[in-house]
Amino acid sequence: MADRTRTRLLNALKSAGPQTAADLAQDLSVTSVAVRQHLDGLHQDGLVDFEDVKGSVGRPKRVWDLTSAGHQQFPDSHSTLIVGLLSGLSDLYGDDGLEKLITHREEKTRQSYTEALSDLADLPERVEVLADLRSREGMFWDQMSPLSVSNIFCPETGVACTGVAIARPMLAGLINRYFRPFEKHLKPLDLPVNPLPDQGPLRLVWHFAKMFRRQLVIVSVLAMISAALGLAGIWAIAYVVDGVTAGGAAVFLRGHGWVLAGFFVLFVIVDPLAFLLRQTFAFQTVRILLPAAMRWQAHKAVEAQDLAFFEDTFAGQVASRIAQVTMSVHRQMMLAIETIPYLVIQFGGSFLLLLALSWPLAIPVLVWIAANSLVAWLAIPTYMQRSAKVAAANSRATGAMTDVYSNIAMVKLFAAEDSEAGAIRKVIGETIDTRHSENRSYILTDSCVYFLNVLMILAVVAIGFWGMTGGWVSIGDFVAGLTVTRSLSAASSRFIGVGQSITSTLGTIKDAMPIMTSRPEITDRSGASALDVTKGRISFEDVSFAYHKDRKPILEAFNLTIEPGERVGLVGLSGAGKSTVISLLMRLRDVTSGSISIDEQDIRSVTQASLRSQIGVVTQDISLLNRSIRDNIRYGKPDAGDDEIRAVAKASEALEFIDEQKDSKGRTGLDAHVGDRGVKLSGGQRQRITIARVLLKNAPILILDEATSALDSEAELAIQQNLARMMEGRTTLAVAHRLSTIAAMDRLVVMDKGRVVEEGNHRDLLALGGLYAVLWERQSGGFLALNAAE
């Protein structure tokens, strides 16, 4: 809480206007009074007690301790607090305990504290100094009188904190003012989200580059300026060397003072400033905001995919590809706008510089550039092919490992660790082989370039000595030529690295593009409206559906109408099509033919979000998010308060076990985290959480797909009573293999091979003596399956 409070202070103070010291003191005292009132209220409740003591510099302070009742109420809290020291609140309340204590008090106290915090947003920027001083260990302030620096004391010395203590945060403020415009002028998560192009890796790179084109151009220009200044420095060295050797240092200094002053400004002031701007734009804008924007846009593209997409693709593989492509596109872009322009200016400028100084020295450089270009042209296609294989092998390995980790319980139950390890060993071995093949190309190319570097340097040295003996190359020209060639030799490794990186990233992008750029088959129509549920009438009209066009339909000429408020149960053997009906109604899949409508609105003509917002679903897949129990229940209503959450948890028979939960980090009750897919809870506990979530959503249409399959009979009976109350007045469609859970429905629809074969209530269907009667007889007799005779 202390960190959050201080962060809020520091962030809020940036844009605040000027304010007097007296107003500032008043605002701060409001917060102190609110905290004191809050603690006094807790004292009246018998939860805390206090003792007035002297501080280390003679100022009084009040130390608060939890009583025994307070320890029972807040078992994870610590014991002491100095009134007015906001950073000390976490000592008493723990990380999340402040919210618990505030909600314990009446609304008036909670409101006064909230208003006190909101008042801090109006404080001037200089409070950042106080906030920094206040947060230092050993410092405190009590209720503040009219503000002056002398109110802030150092316990070590007993005197006011001034000088360095004030200068340090002021310097931090200046640094913050410099960086903030670069960091905040663009909001990467608010950029328009458009479909990702699928025409090739370069088009994908350009798709993201367009969003940051201004920043990329600036970085590119600054990179070229840096390269040009580097070459200017080499020319300046040649100029100075020739001047000194011609007339001596003293004569040169007297005759070229203004030139040297210009060199000083150029290389000591302009060059570092250009470097600072380039690094700031590159790191604080492009290298942070660009990957964030790419990851967000890639996530939105993948998130929009159909359910079938995720059924056919490893979740770990999808996440891995997004991460790979994000970094690959970012790397490609930085090469394109920073490294490549820098090298182009360096290589081309070096040739022109040597041409201007002494043209024979430029000949080896020209030959070297041509030879390196030829090597790159020959090597790049091989790089691309082998890099794509490496990316695919890495993705397979990540996907295989994720698959094992996601199903680790099954692996252990079947003692399959060795067999799974063998499979993982195989895919990791494939990554080793592909990397070896890729690195062969790199090693051979690097060796060729190194050999060309040696030849270039030898040629420049030979021509330089020849020229100096003949008088047509000066010492300064020779020094400049040797410096240029050494610089080019060092830069050649970057040049080859650029080629390797480009091909590697293009291969990675090409391998991942099918995942990121594929178009979902289920989309909202242009101009789709929001679903308006007035009654809740559901109609299936001649619906047919097949998972693949070349397979036999799961549903064929399926017709079913559910009247408003009617409770209908779907019954049938496994594979009859019951869950498919649910998927089609939720539009997780689209019908092959026919139509589904709600209140005369074809579900294909409304937005998917509005359709699903009007339906509460409890499915047989009862996985949970790896978050707190509160977050999982509140998924049904994001703005729900704890009172609502506890009410639905009680209705779903979940409150008792929720209050007993404690995770590995000490979080308890609703704050406890449930682990990956809810693995820390039993199947029955997970199912109760999902039921609570649907109860909280309170949608007009209810779907129960094996809603109580993981519960024991006693818990099922209790929950069924609450579900029955929830179903009143709501159109309900339920699926269950345990027929006793849906026998009381208004109507039961018996399915077989994708068609409706029987309809009626429980008693009528038993009297009919058909498939339902046989299923009921088998289950009531203790059998769980229907043999071939049926």
Image: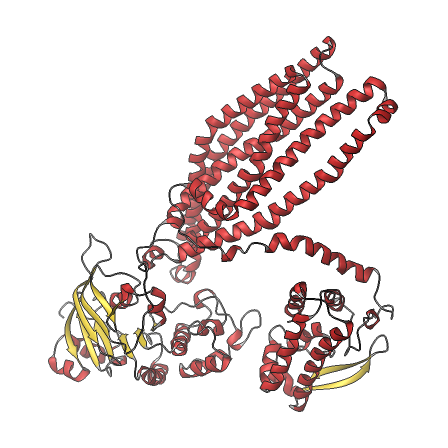
Q: Residue furthest top?
A: 470
Give the percent coordinates (x, y) of residue 527.
Answer: 32, 61
Q: Is residue 231 above or below residue 774?
A: above
Q: Quadrant of the C terminus?
A: bottom left
Q: From the viewer's side, name the closer residue of 682 and 447.
A: 447
Q: Quadrant of residue 273?
A: top right
Q: How many numbered circles are shown? A: 0
Q: From the viewer's side, name the closer residue of 110 and 414.
A: 110
Report whether 215 appears left or right of 726.
right
Q: Confirm whether residue 783 shows in the render.
A: no
Q: Quadrant of residue 183?
A: bottom right
Give the percent coordinates (x, y) of residue 493.
Answer: 59, 31
Q: Quadrant of the N terminus?
A: bottom right
Report whether 501 appears left or right of 35.
left
Give the percent coordinates (x, y) of residue 710.
Answer: 35, 74
Report whether 338 appears left or right of 358.
left
Give the percent coordinates (x, y) of residue 93.
Answer: 64, 77
Q: Quadrant of residue 144?
A: bottom right
Q: Is residue 221 above or below residue 644?
A: above
Question: Residue at 21% of width from left, 73% of height from top?
Answer: 571
Q: Confirm whether residue 689 shows in the render.
A: yes
Report whether 79 appears left or right of 642.
right
